[in-house]
Amino acid sequence: MKRGDLLSLDDLTPEQLSQILDRARELKARRLAREFLAGQSLALLFDKPSLRTRASFDVAMYELGGHVVYLGPDEVGLGRREAIADVARVLSQYVHAIAARIGSHQTLEELARAASVPVINALSDRSHPCQGLADLLTLREHFGRLAGIRLGYIGDGNNIAHTLLSAAGKVGLHLTLASPPGYECDAAAVERARREAEMHGGSITLTNDPAEAARDADALYTDVWTSMGQEDQAAVRRQIFARYRVDRELLRFARPGALVMHDLPAHRGEEITDEVIDGPQSVVFEQAANRLHVQKAVLLWLMVRVDGYVV
Ligand code: CP
Ligand code: NVA
């Protein structure tokens, strides 16, 4: 029986989330720990392009002593050349875990149900839990805590926004999301996050006003206006989101020295200006760096068959 999957941060209790962040910090201090996953393999099943996720999982497995099998968009033909469930059953006999980047979250869930090994969401249309963990680690490194931090998200109510919603509820962030009308997060996900946030001292606010999300924020976060697979909407979105750019003027609403965050890749000049992403408040490359460490912690959590591994 597999230990579990990580399809969304909703799969983690606040305690498990905090344990993963603690482990990531330890693994960051000691990069090479090849005894942990010696003899274990991870399949990277990717239906979309990637830099950070692919490279960091590959290096994570190397540094933990394991092996990676990369299967790109042209190789497997998920659901086209072969049924999702069949792919899952076959791969489960070769590898000890699967990290999958599949557009549709529903398809990802189907893969996870059919797989007998843990499945990690490497980005779906609904969620990007590995990115969310890296973002939380980055915030914690800067503020020494997560509870009570004011995070303003400006942009599309997309996979990244939903990930921040799940995270905020669990760790007690005060999250304000500013999206254009019609591009807000899913109402049910907002309600769920609000209920969780109430238990942990956080809050979730939705607005259409970017300045409201930026006001007094400890950190500002943005993501692309056009996600992978939405390229045919790019021109329309450029017009609709024009007011939702993180630039120097918007940053003035935030607290002095507020962090600037982006999961990358960035569409420079659209959702964020060069001077802000390259400026002294930007932590975007720290977020990218932390992907490696949190993913190692996730791999150990799902693949090492003991509770509470110790480095
Ligand atoms: N942030 C992120 O997941 O980047 P990639 O799409 O390059 O993996
Ligand atoms: N929202 C972006 C995130 C990329 C990591 C996308 O889905 O393309």
Image: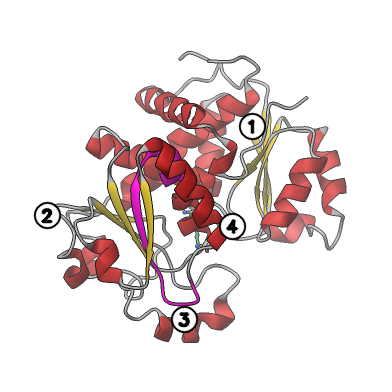
**Residue corresponding to mark 2:** 256
Mark 1 lies within 8 Å of ligand 1 (Cβ measured): no
| Amino acid beneath label 1 | His
Q: Are marks 2 and 1 in contact (CB under 8 Å)?
A: no
Q: Quadrant of the N terminus?
A: top right
* Residue at far left of view: 256
- Magenta-highlighted residues: 166-183
**Residue corresponding to mark 3:** 237
| Amino acid beneath label 3 | Arg
Which residue is more in the foreground, 191 or 80?
Answer: 191
Residue that appears at 52% across and 68% down: 227
x, y (%) of residue 60?
A: 52, 34
x, y (%) of residue 208?
A: 36, 73
Q: Quadrant of the C terminus?
A: top left
Say whether residue 304 is left or right of residue 132. Answer: right
Whole-angstrom CA distance, mark 1 to mark 4, is 28 Å
Q: Height in image: 152 above or below 94?
A: below
Earlier sequence position, callout 2 versus callout 3: 3
x, y (%) of residue 189?
A: 54, 55
Whole-angstrom CA distance, mark 3 to mark 1, is 40 Å
Location of residue 306 by image quarter: top right
| The magenta stretch spans residue 182 | yes
Q: Are marks 2 and 4 in contact (CB under 8 Å)?
A: no
| Amino acid beneath label 4 | Arg
Whole-angstrom CA distance, mark 2 to mark 4, is 32 Å
Earlier sequence position, callout 4 versus callout 3: 4
Which residue is more in the foreground, 240 or 75?
Answer: 240
**Number of the label disc, if any, that sits on residue 126:** 4
Indicate which label's residue lies in the foreground, 2 or 1. Answer: 2
**Number of the label disc, if any, that sits on residue 67:** 1
